Image: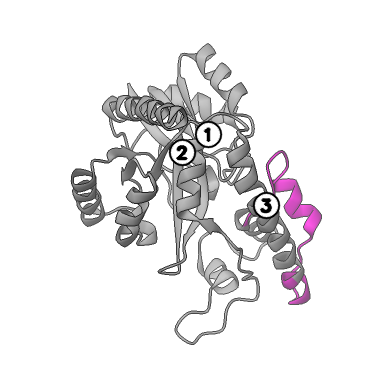
Amino acid sequence: MKVDLHCHTNISDCSFSFEVILEKALKENVSHLAITNHDTTKGLEEMVHLGKEKGIEIIPGIEISAYDFNRERRIHVLGYFIKHGHPSLEKLCRPLLERRHDASYVMVQNLIEAGYTISWEQVEEYAKGGTGVYKQHIMHALIENGYTDSIYGDLYKKLFSRGQNGEAPGIAFIPVKYVDARLAIQAIIQAGGVPVLAHPGQYKSFEAVPELVEAGLQGIEVWHPLHGPEDEERAKLCAAHFDLIMTGGTDFHGFYGEKEVVIGSKDPGIQAVEGLKARGKFLKSSILVEKER
């Protein structure tokens, strides 16, 4: 049996529903699957129940879109075994979801003004049932309308470029204000969860690890589709030095993913699940001790 600790659904920015993902997980003999939609706990209770019916342990999770303001870099923080709808997560993430959705609306209007045949209604249809529109939904519309044949190709880079090294930003680039990574870690702990640094190799967030550990970080994602051998080795060294749980997963997004992956193909082993559960118990006992003081 396999473990996958990083998987999205169409509630955020995956092209597949949870039901489809569950069938894919069954086909690949996945026994433990963490659902880590961006900035929301929507649907987690039902997913856990449906997983039990199929014989798969669904780990309720979240992936918070955070930021390292000291180094001006994005940082994603995974949270495992969180309480569905916890106020600390709702307070932190709901404004973020709204900002992302509003930014996507402006992106679409900019594309329309630039002459692209696209509509907000079409884009919304691809995001139906989720928490808002993502860039992937916009690209899906552009693919359907014949402008490109891939999500993350030249057109994506052209439209959504941040404009670094003196270059002008893309016409659809609208910055979104993210939350402080340390606040994300604290919110996950308050929600009864275990915070883990997501794909540090992808976002070059290794330098922030000491500060994040100080804020309460408990794990680091070692195995990820966009991690090379050097990233994995560096993550393992961080885990050893800071006593972090080593996790891994496919970061599954279906058709919307940056590369094609099979659920369960970045298996961190059952010891990762056991480690997260043990660390979760430790955090809860520590919080109880603090309250009693």
The span from disc 1 to disc 2 (Cα, nearest Å) is 9 Å
Q: Position of residue 261 (x, y in %)?
A: 41, 43
Secondary structure under the numbered disc 1 in the rendered image: loop
Residue found 60% across the figure and 23% down from its top: 45
Task: Residue type at mark 2: give it.
Answer: Gly
Q: Amino acid at mark 1?
A: Ala
Q: Nearer the viewer, mark 1 or mark 3?
A: 1
Task: Pinpoint residue 249: horizontal percent, then vertical percent.
Answer: 37, 39
User: Label 1 belongs to which residue?
Assistant: 191
> SS of the residue at dot 3?
helix
Q: Position of residue 19 (x, y in %)?
A: 59, 26
Q: Residues within 10 Å of mark 1 (few under 14, many from 20)?
A: many
Task: In the rendered structure, find residue 79 and report the number of the disc placed on it.
Answer: 2
Verify CB contact (< 8 Å) between mark 1 and mark 2.
Answer: yes
The residue under the point 67% across, 52% down is: 95
Whether 28 is drawn above or below 178: the answer is: above
Nearer-N-terminus badge (3/2)? 2
Is residue 144 left or right of 289 when viewed as pictured? right
Magenta span covers which residues?
110-134
Pick whichever, 188 or 204, lies toward us.
188
Quadrant of the drawing holding the C terminus: top left
Residue located 61% across and 47% down the image: 93
Q: Which residue is mark 3?
A: 95
> In the displayed structure, does residue 241 sit left or right of residue 287?
left
Asked if marks 1 and 3 touch (Cβ < 8 Å), the reply is: no
**Res 143 quadrant in image:** bottom right
Nearest to the observer: residue 205 or residue 92: 92
Q: Secondary structure at mark 2?
A: strand
Is 122 displayed left or right of 57 in the figure? Answer: right
